[in-house]
Amino acid sequence: MHYLPVLYSLLLAAELGHGNSVSILLSAGANPDLKDHNGIMACDLATASGHGAVTKVLDDFYLAHGLAKHYGPGTNKTGMPAANQADGVRAV
């Protein structure tokens, strides 16, 4: 996956499971609602990549700031691709 370094840092950190980087980026004003070219957000990428601790960092940020959590297209409220939730397989 190729991201623009500044705009998509949060997405990349979330997908790779770098919780400390996610926290720092959020503290510095990164937008947790930013979507990648497929319309997927950082919380969706973290969850789909199996990084539950990063998903929690993002969820806690939403709660602490009174923000409504949004979900990317094709995902359900777990952040997993809707078609794959039943069998626990994630899209790669």
Image (cartoon, rainbow, N blue to C red):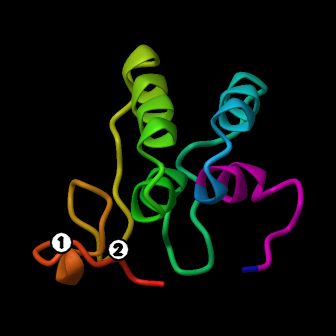
Q: Tell us which disc is closer to us: 1 or 2.
A: 1
Amino acid marked by disc 1: Gln
Q: Is residue 11 magenta?
A: yes
Q: Which residue is mark 2?
A: 73
Q: Position of residue 54 (x, y in %)?
A: 52, 40
- Relative to 26, residue 44 above or below: below
In the orientation shown, which residue stands out farthest toward the left? 86
Q: In x, y percent, where is residue 29?
A: 73, 30
Q: Is residue 74 left or right of residue 54?
A: left
| Amino acid type indicated by mark 2 | Pro
Q: Quadrant of the rendered structure where residue 67 is?
A: top left
Is 62 placed left or right of 89 in the picture? right
Label 1 packing within 10 angstroms: few (<14), some (14-19), many (20+) = some
| Magenta residues (range) | 2-14
Q: Which residue is mark 1?
A: 85
Instruction: Please tell me whether mark 2 sits on a helix, a strand or a loop.
Output: loop
| Cα–Cα gap, marks 1 and 2 | 14 Å
Q: Position of residue 63 (x, y in %)?
A: 37, 21
Residue at 28% from the left image edge and 69% from the top image edge = 75
